[in-house]
Image (tube, rainbow, N blue to C red):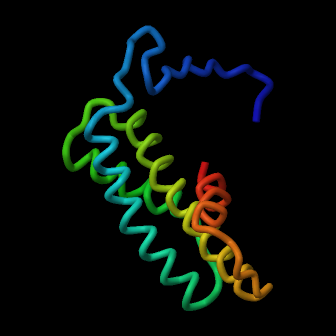
Amino acid sequence: MSDETRSIPPVEPVLDPKKDYVEINSYVVFWGLFYAAIFTLAVGYLCLKIGQTVDAFAPVSVLAMGTAVILKRQNAFAETVHIQAIASSSTNTLAGAMFFLPALYIWNVTDVSFVQMAIPIILGGV
């Protein structure tokens, strides 16, 4: 390789920083909740079957971007990020429930109310 400096063309950002984008809309909420339901069931089954959970972030990322390409969405990159966040938080909440509730059973804790069980699980997903 020679000592000559190569000129690298400037890279344009994926999203125009001067443009305002609508990132949260009904499309994002629908597909986020749809993928959350599908992957919550799948991760719940895996947790009960093999005792291990996986995060849904990567598969939802691929599916959300593929859906956006098929539906020819204009703002696909920004919307996909939020779809991933919605779906991923649901599996995190599920993982909290799958590991927290059996721990109460193993410790033989019986005097816990529904609210006392729900609060740590919900906070785990946030």
Q: Residue furthest front?
A: 111
Q: Is residue 63 above or below residue 117?
A: above
Q: Is residue 68 above or below residue 122?
A: above
**In the rendering, at what x and y percent does residue 114 appear?**
58, 67
**In the rendering, at what x and y percent does residue 24 appear?**
37, 32
Q: Nearer the viewer, residue 36 or 56?
A: 36
Q: Nearer the viewer, residue 87 or 8?
A: 87
Q: Nearer the viewer, residue 75 or 51?
A: 51
Q: Quadrant of the N terminus?
A: top right
- Identify the residue at horizontal 42%, vertical 74% (top origin): 41
- Look at the image and tell me whether residue 92 can be seen: no
Q: Residue furthest bottom?
A: 49
Q: In the figure, residue 25 lies in which quadrant? A: top left
Q: Residue furthest left?
A: 71
- Look at the image and tell me whether residue 97 can be seen: yes
**In the rendering, at what x and y percent does residue 16 appear?**
43, 16
**In the rendering, at what x and y percent does residue 109 appear?**
75, 81
Q: Could you tell whether 37 is left or right of 122 in the image?
A: left
- Identify the residue at horizontal 36%, vertical 49% (top origin): 65
Q: In the figure, residue 89 lies in which quadrant? A: bottom right
Q: Nearer the viewer, residue 98 or 10?
A: 98
- Identify the residue at horizontal 43%, vertical 58% (top origin): 60
